[in-house]
Amino acid sequence: MEERVINVMLSGVGGQGTILASDVLCSVFHEMGYDVKKSEVHGMAQRGGDVTTHFRFGKKVYSPLIKFGDVDYLVSLELLEGLRYINWLKKEGKVLLNLQEIYPPAVNLGKMKYPEDIVGVFKKFFNGRVYTVDGLDLAIQCGDSRATNVVILGAFSKIFDISEEVWERNLLNHLPPRIHELNLRAFRAGRGAIS
Amino acid sequence: MRKILSGNEAIARGAYEAGVKIAAAYPGTPSSEILTTLSQEYNEYILTEWSPNEKVALEVAIGASFAGARAMASMKHVGLNVASDPFMTVSYTGVKGGLVIVVADDPYSHSSQNEQDSRHWARFGKVPMLEPCDSQECKEFTKLAFELSEQFDTPILVRTETRVAHSFSPVEFGERIESPIPLGLEKKESPKYTMVPIYVRIRRKFVEERMKRLEEFANEFKHNVIEINDPKIGVITSGVCYNYTKEVFPQYSYLKLGMVWPLPKKTISEFSKKVKKIIIVEELDPFLETEIRAMGIKVTHGKDVIPNHYELSPEVVEKAIKGRNYRPPKERVNTSELPARPPNLCSGCSHRALFYAIKKLGLFTFGDIGCYTLATAPPLNAIHSTICMGAGVGGAFGAMKALGKEGLGKCCAVIGDSTFLHAGIPPLMDIVYNKGNSTTIILDNQTTGMTGLQEHPGTGFTATGEPTHQIDYEELVRALGVKHVRKVDPYKIQETMEVIKEEVERDEPSVIITTNSPCMLHRRVKRKFEHPFYMVLTEKCRGCGLCLEAGCPAISWREVSQWETMSQDGHKRKGVVDINRLQCPGCGLCSQICKFEAIVPGEG
């Protein structure tokens, strides 16, 4: 078992489902015998604002918040929301980006430009440790754009040496039965997207 | 069994295990999920209610306690201001069944109008306060709070804050144990419960004696924990601040206070003798520091380095304590220059339509507490003051009194349905009684939207989803004496503007109520729009940007290529707008704003 605490930051836009993804992470690592803590801010999260979840696991976790600069894995469901937290990563950190762009109001109003080549910026600092997935496209192929979060979760699950069965069982525990099949497809599509 | 729960869910679990019979609350971030959990998961055992406001919630809990039931009221920090009247006096009466008041602070004001530190209420009200640091403690401390409440004949506060209430961690489950206190009202106990001067004076002395006994108890309390590691530095802290500090300085010695009021003075002295230097780490005010310094104990660092505003975090604590020795991580990208993503009203939200009308009329708007505070932001910029629940109604009245006839046609108050029932009725009564002339607009979205869609007396359903009496706002305000009551469909901008204009110019009190305007996230009630979505006829769009003034997240502007710089009717343009079909619910606001008929209903 990993002695030190591992820090995972999930970011995205309200409504993208970062919270479900982090719920599943929490139950998977708890089942594997780790202490876990997860922290998020909601209240206004459903209203299109940015959403970040701090997820930590290890032998004993104290703080519910990750220390700035201590993120081991940054998983972002949206490119700009990934870039917003680039400074939170450790030098040796790893990044998983969903190649989706959701324009914030200032861009929609034509007042600011959406940043260019975000993936390139990440590669500059984390070369060889940047993974990208077109989660939205895969989710649509699986039958529903709303399963993008689960595609990305599937891709992220590949990083850890935990059986697919554990991931899938915990995922389904968090979802109503009528969408089980769709989400299993999405999870597997994501898992298959990372080699 | 162990489960991962949020702090709020864990408090609900603790209340369940403690044998609670009655739980009442008014929703408020970050406390709302306590009652939601109780009403959804434990409603077989516990009678739960969304009360109209926190004062009522606490009074309901007090009555239940006097009848022998274990009872709980939960609220956010500013909710306790509303409930402070019964709170300050129930401290004197004490309890029969255990009485727990949960108060959830919101440092950094993630979703609040201020950052007040609720620990002061414990000292002010002479009531003990427990402060858990994670979900396991949330459950344990809540359970324990009921026992202490009965043991010491006192109401008791459990204080959380955003990072405790909304963080998730494992919780060990226990069995529910019913309270041994028999239910029943005893008239012979009335001197204890009747706070008229003669009995107040008796209970006043009791309160002081009780606090002395509680202080003695605090010295033995198993959740005031001394941890001696390196004796050079000893940290005195509580709640989530312990977690942050322990994370960055595991080598230090600690006194972690599970009970933050009254303070265990003997334990604190004992700890101060075991370590060389004392550092006090606490969020917001120097509450512990003031008390500990007053004991004559030398404190090396406290609020001289730890910020007294915003929330703490591991790096804030590290930076404060290391001072000049702190090395920040390297900045790779200047992220402060990235386009921000502030929260926004949902696409299709009726508030957007209503505030667009207000903006066009150029009114000064006295706002209130709810989603509609989001209309403060550009491009709507349509709320001009926000103080607290209900303040908009009284505020507009006061402003109109000050301005006299000059004020007519210049201002209005807006208030949500849930907020109106919480604190909007007395100020409306005042407008009529004291011969005012201000206009109050009730934004009826048929739910408590901002906090996550809770029921209230105007929705016709209880906390557990049972149908109940539904308040008729028109009948209610007419009973208060308001003669001019108008109903508007906010999605019809022109009509809405005309009605608002007429009423704000009227030299008499008036109320405008929005109809058929449910919250877009409402699960039970949906407005059926005429068309499934709207689309832009790109050839007609002049790129004037007028529709963007509504700030709808579904509408965006883009520059046009060199072949598109002219609209069909020959007007030069730099760009055009697009509507994201996936986000557009078809409310039609933008098509009413467009002057060039470039936005039309979509089909299919």
Image (cartoon, helix red, strand yellow):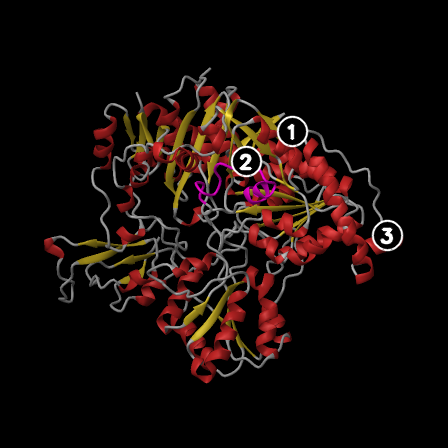
Tell me how many marks there are.
3
Compared to residue B408, the image places residue B324 above or below, namely above
The disc at residue B335 is none
Q: Is residue B555 magenta?
A: no
Crowding at label 1, few (<14), some or many (≥20) Cα neighbours within 10 Å? some
* Three-letter code for the amino acid on which mark 3 is drawn: Glu
Where does the C terminus of chain A fall, quadrant-wise? top left
- Cα gap from disc 2 to disc 1, whole angstroms: 27 Å
Q: For the residues tagged 2 and 1, is the chain the same?
A: yes
Q: Residue at x 82, y 58 (%)?
A: B199
Nearest to the observer: residue A57 or residue B272:
B272
The disc at residue B173 is 1
Numbered disc in front, either 3 or 2: 2
Pointer 1 chain: B
Quarter location, residue B314: top left
Nearest to the observer: residue B495 or residue B189:
B189
- Cα gap from disc 1 to disc 3, whole angstroms: 36 Å
* Residue assigned mark 2: B237
Q: For the residues tagged 1 and 3, is the chain the same?
A: yes
Compared to residue B521, the image places residue B262 above or below, namely above
Pointer 2 chain: B
Quarter location, residue B461: bottom right
Pointer 3 chain: B
Numbered disc in front, either 2 or 1: 2
* Highlighted range, magenta: B288-307
* Residue assigned mark 3: B189
